[in-house]
């Protein structure tokens, strides 16, 4: 059988062929965005991408090591997860600024589902990638629209508090602290007398240095032609140092610790032994053999991961459903190099933008920096003090706790504080349940508004009832209750004009209830007139063959009709 393409007649000079070719070309470029900018790539772009890529790389390496600790994994898994995103997003990415890799919140979520098991972490990345790609192909991104802003802010704030406080144990040099937040708080305070002085001094010093560098960067005045060359150079040095502050702090702490360790002075808790070299490229394991010889099957792992297979893919797409395909493919391919689930990093994306990146190729440079670290620096990572990594994490998540948002919610709509607080408090108890609780509360509030639309009732000798939204089956009981209480169960019964100019949809349950109402109005010898119905809704009501359906284009016309009816009587 000949290939299908050979069976299609080709008219090379026809307008139809040109249109088809154009559509195919656009579709191909939409699926592989690198083709839109690679032909125009130039040396100037390369220079800017290298600068941005190196800068982001120096930020990524210490953060990746730190976030692996949050996920409960050996530190090398943070680096395993940090390079594939740059390579994949270079080909599939649509924004020059976005960087993919491990993040604090994603690491915290993973920690609750993988239990520190690398096999679970890598398989979770693979399955999350499949789910994210499926969401993109099936166009199910609308599901994220049901996660309201107060829920997201409540979740990120609680996650930041949980992550930040979880690092206090490393600042104090404490061990055997539970992961559950409230137990963590209790046992951390209980064990304060066991704190190691060296870790405390180093951790606090690193945090102060990071805070000072962030403050210096935020207070730098904008460069202008009035500044001298020396001032410009000084500002650029300060800005560069503040931008790569994480690397500076971790490198400085590591050098100091290495010097003391070489002199047999053991004052600090170290990262310890790490695996050397690049991760092997292989499919994720779909089963596991425990140390006691028990075989954990794929189905058992999936059951253990449970709700994480829903929550983690969705949370990974909160930044932008538009690039879910790139996120999903990155997680799938990343699982072949022992990565755990990644997403877009707001902090590193901001650094990427501020350093003037021109194309997604900057991510390739970042990926190379991470690979070089894996290849040559892993023995050095043994000497990284955990207190310095904890300081990096605390300073990274602190901006997510934004009390200004709470004040703004109070000013704009106080009721929105309910899903915020529910999400925040439940997330402190169990982070994986917080987002679910928030969605349920937001959904209940949304459904309540749907079931109880506002109906304004005014008396003009007859009743005018104005609906402020659409009518669907949850609202039928409320509508009937208002009409019966105000018009049919009073003496004498009252005629009603139902102003439907804001109604854009109705369903079968509503139509059936309107039929019953019209019968009751006829039995009571009063009138129900619909006003301002859209043509599409009027067609639905006519098709339902409602008895004695009366409709006018405007409220005024309905008034005239009722007044004329009264005079005739």
Image: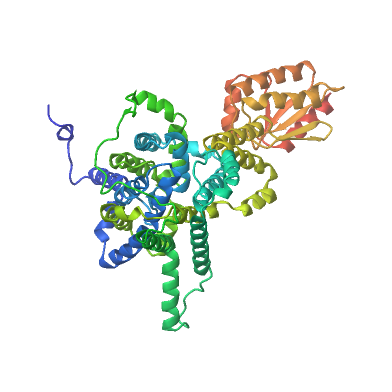
Q: Is residue 291 visible?
A: yes
- Position of residue 90 measured from the top left corner of the image (x, y, whole percent): 31, 52
- Which sits in the foreground, 215 or 349? 215
Location of the C terminus (image quadrant): top right
Image quarter of residue 95: bottom left
What is the residue that sits farthest to the right in this orientation?
491
- Which sits in the foreground, 401 or 63? 63
**Height in image: 206 above or below 335?**
below
- Which sits in the foreground, 454 or 510? 454
- Position of residue 54 measured from the top left corner of the image (x, y, whole percent): 33, 62
**Height in image: 231 above or below 556?**
below
Image quarter of residue 301: top left
Q: Is residue 187 left or right of residue 493?
A: left
Which residue is painted at 36% across and 61% down in the image?
263
- Position of residue 21 measured from the top left corner of the image (x, y, whole percent): 24, 45
Q: Is residue 512 left or right of residue 222?
A: right
Q: Is residue 358 visible?
A: no
Q: Is residue 256 left or right of residue 370?
A: right
**Height in image: 537 above or below 177?**
above
């Amino acid at each position: 059988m000949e290939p299908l393409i050979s069976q299609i007649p080709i008219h090379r000079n026809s307008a139809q062929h040109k249109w088809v070719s154009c559509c195919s070309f656009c579709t191909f470029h939409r699926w592989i965005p690198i083709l839109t900018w690679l032909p125009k790539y130039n040396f100037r772009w390369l220079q800017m991408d290298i600068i941005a890529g190196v800068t982001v790389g120096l930020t990524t390496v210490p953060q990746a090591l730190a976030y692996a600790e949050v996920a409960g994994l050996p530190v090398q898994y943070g680096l395993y997860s940090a390079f594939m995103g740059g390579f994949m997003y270079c080909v599939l990415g649509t924004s020059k600024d976005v960087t993919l890799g491990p993040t604090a919140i994603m690491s915290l979520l993973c920690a609750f589902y993988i239990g520190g098991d690398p096999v679970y972490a890598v398989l979770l990345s693979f399955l999350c990638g499949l789910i994210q790609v499926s969401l993109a192909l099936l166009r199910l991104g609308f599901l994220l629209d049901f996660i309201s802003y107060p829920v997201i802010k409540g979740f990120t704030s609680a996650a930041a508090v949980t992550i930040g406080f979880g690092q206090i144990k490393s600042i104090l040099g404490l061990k055997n602290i539970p992961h559950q937040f409230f137990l963590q708080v209790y046992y951390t305070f209980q064990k304060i007398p066991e704190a190691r002085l060296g870790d405390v001094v180093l951790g606090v010093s690193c945090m102060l240095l990071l805070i000072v560098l962030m403050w210096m960067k935020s207070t730098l005045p904008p460069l202008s032609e009035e500044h001298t060359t020396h001032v410009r150079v000084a500002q650029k040095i300060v800005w560069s140092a503040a931008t790569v502050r994480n690397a500076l702090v971790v490198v400085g702490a590591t050098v100091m610790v290495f010097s003391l360790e070489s002199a047999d002075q053991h004052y600090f808790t170290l990262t310890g032994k790490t695996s050397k070299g690049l991760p092997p490229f292989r499919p994720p394991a779909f089963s596991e053999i425990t140390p006691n010889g028990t075989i954990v099957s794929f189905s058992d792992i999936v059951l253990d991961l449970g709700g994480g297979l829903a929550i983690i893919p969705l949370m990974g797409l909160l930044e932008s459903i538009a690039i879910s395909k790139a996120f999903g493919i990155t997680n799938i391919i990343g699982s072949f190099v022992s990565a755990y689930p990644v997403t877009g990093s707001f902090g590193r994306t901001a650094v990427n933008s501020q350093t003037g990146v021109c194309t997604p190729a900057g991510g390739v440079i970042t990926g190379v920096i991470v690979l070089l670290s894996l290849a040559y620096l892993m023995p050095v990572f043994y000497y990284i003090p955990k207190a310095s990594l904890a300081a990096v994490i605390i300073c990274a998540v602190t901006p997510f706790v934004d009390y200004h948002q709470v004040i703004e919610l109070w000013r704009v709509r106080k009721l929105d504080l309910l899903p915020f607080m529910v999400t925040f408090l439940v997330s402190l108890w169990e982070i994986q349940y917080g987002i679910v609780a928030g969605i349920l509360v937001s959904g209940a509030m949304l459904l309540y508004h749907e079931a109880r639309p506002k109906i304004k009732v005014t008396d003009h000798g007859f009743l005018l009832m104005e609906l402020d939204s659409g009518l669907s089956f949850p609202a039928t009981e409320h509508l009937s209750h208002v009409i019966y209480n105000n018009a049919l169960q009073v003496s004498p019964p009252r005629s009603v004009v139902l102003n439907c100019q804001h109604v854009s949809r109705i369903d079968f349950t509503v139509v059936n209830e309107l039929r019953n109402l019209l019968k009751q109005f006829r039995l009571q010898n009063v009138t129900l007139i619909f006003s301002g119905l859209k043509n599409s809704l009027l067609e639905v009501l006519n098709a339902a063959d409602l008895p004695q359906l009366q409709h006018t284009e405007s409220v005024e016309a309905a008034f005239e009709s009722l007044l004329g009816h009264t005079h005739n009587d």
